[in-house]
């Protein structure tokens, strides 16, 4: 019956049924027809478990970071970050794309969400890129890929959920994606310049002298200090042991409101309620999804799906690195069909027993999950971030696909390979900062 439930899940997702409904359809099949004798399970085994799962203080951090991202988006905080980064790389061919990439990384270190990063930085960058002669398809694909850095540079909502499900330290999970995130920033910047190397329509700003750079840096740096203090407060508070992740997320909201209203004047006091309501709605959707997928993952565990999957993998190879490759393929396929949070919640309870039995470090797997879920956000047919970028930039999807494929193959695929097969790249910071074993 477990295989029928998986077919139901995949078929409904392919048909475009909403993800929570797809989860519930698969769970309903197992609820009525699962079990060793096909008699199904009692609902009393599932509902208390699902309620207990979502009754966690750690999940409050997701709501708070979403709220902080919405406030920052409307408060014009991203604009000052972009102006500051432009001082250093704005004068080279493709430099404006690098400005957008680095700005996404900085903004992502505050919001922890790709869509919030794209909505804020993208709406500022798209007119600038168009004025600079960048092809629309290239700009849309570039910003879609760059916004995913918000899923690698901590804080990261998906890794909060992974840590909650797997019982791993949130800080170690956060640190595991920092090095892959840095490598991704470099690769996206390089590929951006390579794709534009022969495009003469791309405008290049005049090269600034050292004195001009210094004057701009002082002027724009002073304006950007309030925005730059936000990641310092959040990440410094977390890693300094001053605040928990949940407390830091609340501090991000408390700090972002006066900065957006009083310092950058991007919104008025009465407009603050808008991001708060939107974040509440988004959080409600996420919690409903977590509730439904918690029941489904519980049923999959009762059906002993992890052992069955591992046995299936071992029919191909007994080598754990080959099995890790197959796990990556599985995660990529899941990412093509559903959003990042759904992938994490559904696959973590199933894959963690396999990862532990194969002898892999769970923090290493956290980084693999982080990179895979980011890649899934731009991989059709789901590709929510890719489609959002097309809507924001008013670019048809066919114009975006070729440059998007270049970024996927030349940036994300190598990062996923490095993350999977060079564990020390991932575990370096967790080991140095927290003493996590190699």
Image (cartoon, rainbow, N blue to C red):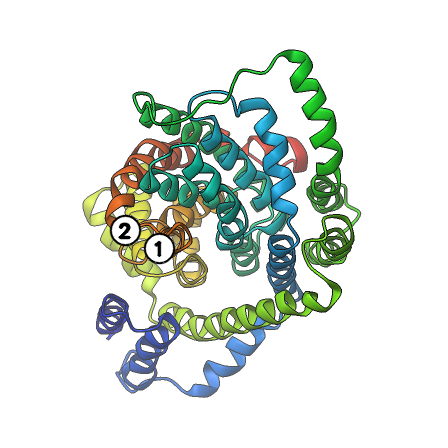
Give the side of residue 50 with respect to residue 238, left or right: left
Disc 1, disc 2: CB below 8 Å? Answer: yes
**x then y, percent, for residue 132:** 43, 32
Residue 347: which disc? none
Near mark 1 (Cα within 10 A), the count class, few <14, some 14-19 or many ≥20, is many
Q: Residue at x 38, y 74 (%)?
A: 299
Q: Nearer the viewer, residue 192 or 416?
A: 192
Residue 387: which disc? 1
Is residue 365 visible in this depiction of the protein?
A: no
Looking at the image, residue 370 lies above or below residue 334: above
Query: Which quadrant of the view contains residue 223?
Result: top right
Near mark 2 (Cα within 10 A), the count class, few <14, some 14-19 or many ≥20, is some
SS state under label 2:
helix
Q: Nearer the viewer, residue 155 or 133?
A: 133
Give the side of residue 384 with respect to residue 185, left or right: left
**x then y, percent, for residue 372:** 39, 47
What residue is disc 2 on? 397
Looking at the image, residue 205 lies above or below residue 158: above
Is residue 411 visible in this depiction of the protein?
A: yes
């Amino acid at each position: 019956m477990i295989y029928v439930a998986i077919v139901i899940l995949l078929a409904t997702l392919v048909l475009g049924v909403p993800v929570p409904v797809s989860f519930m359809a698969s769970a309903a099949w197992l609820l009525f027809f699962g079990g060793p004798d096909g008699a199904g399970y009692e609902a009393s085994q599932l509902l208390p478990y699902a309620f207990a799962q979502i009754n966690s203080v750690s999940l409050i951090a997701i709501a708070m970071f979403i709220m902080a991202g919405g406030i920052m988006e409307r408060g014009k905080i991203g604009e000052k970050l972009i102006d500051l980064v432009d001082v250093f790389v704005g004068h080279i061919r493709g430099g404006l794309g690098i400005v957008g990439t680095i700005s996404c990384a900085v903004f992502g270190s505050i919001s922890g969400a790709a869509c919030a990063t794209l909505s804020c930085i993208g709406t500022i960058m798209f007119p600038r890129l168009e004025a600079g002669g960048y092809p629309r398809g290239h700009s849309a694909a570039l910003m879609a890929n760059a916004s995913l850095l918000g899923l690698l540079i901590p804080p990261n909502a998906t890794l909060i959920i992974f840590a909650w499900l797997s019982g791993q330290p949130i800080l170690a999970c956060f640190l595991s994606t920092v090095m892959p995130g840095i490598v991704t920033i470099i690769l996206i910047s390089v590929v951006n310049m390579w794709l534009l190397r022969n495009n003469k329509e791309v405008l290049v700003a005049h090269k600034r002298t050292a004195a001009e750079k210094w004057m701009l840096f002082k002027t724009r740096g002073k304006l950007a200090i309030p925005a730059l203090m936000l990641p310092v407060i959040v990440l410094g508070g977390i890693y300094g042991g001053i605040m928990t992740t949940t407390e830091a997320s609340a501090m991000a909201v408390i700090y972002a409101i006066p900065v957006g209203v009083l310092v950058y004047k991007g919104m008025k006091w009465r407009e603050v309620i808008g991001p708060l309501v939107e974040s509440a709605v988004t959080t409600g959707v996420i919690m409903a999804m977590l509730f439904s997928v918690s029941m489904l993952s519980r049923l999959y565990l009762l059906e002993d799906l992890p052992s069955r999957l591992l046995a299936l993998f071992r029919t191909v190879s007994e080598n754990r690195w080959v099995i890790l490759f197959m796990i990556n393929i599985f995660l990529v396929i899941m990412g093509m069909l559903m959003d990042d949070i759904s992938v994490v919640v559904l696959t973590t309870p199933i894959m963690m027993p396999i990862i532990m039995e194969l002898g892999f470090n769970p923090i290493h797997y956290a980084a693999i999950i982080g990179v895979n879920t980011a890649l899934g956000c731009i991989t059709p047919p789901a590709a929510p971030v890719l489609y959002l970028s097309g809507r924001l930039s008013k670019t048809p999807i066919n114009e975006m696909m070729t440059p998007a494929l270049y970024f996927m193959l030349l940036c994300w695929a190598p990062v996923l390979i490095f993350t999977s097969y060079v564990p020390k790249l991932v575990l370096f910071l967790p080991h140095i900062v927290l003493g996590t074993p190699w």
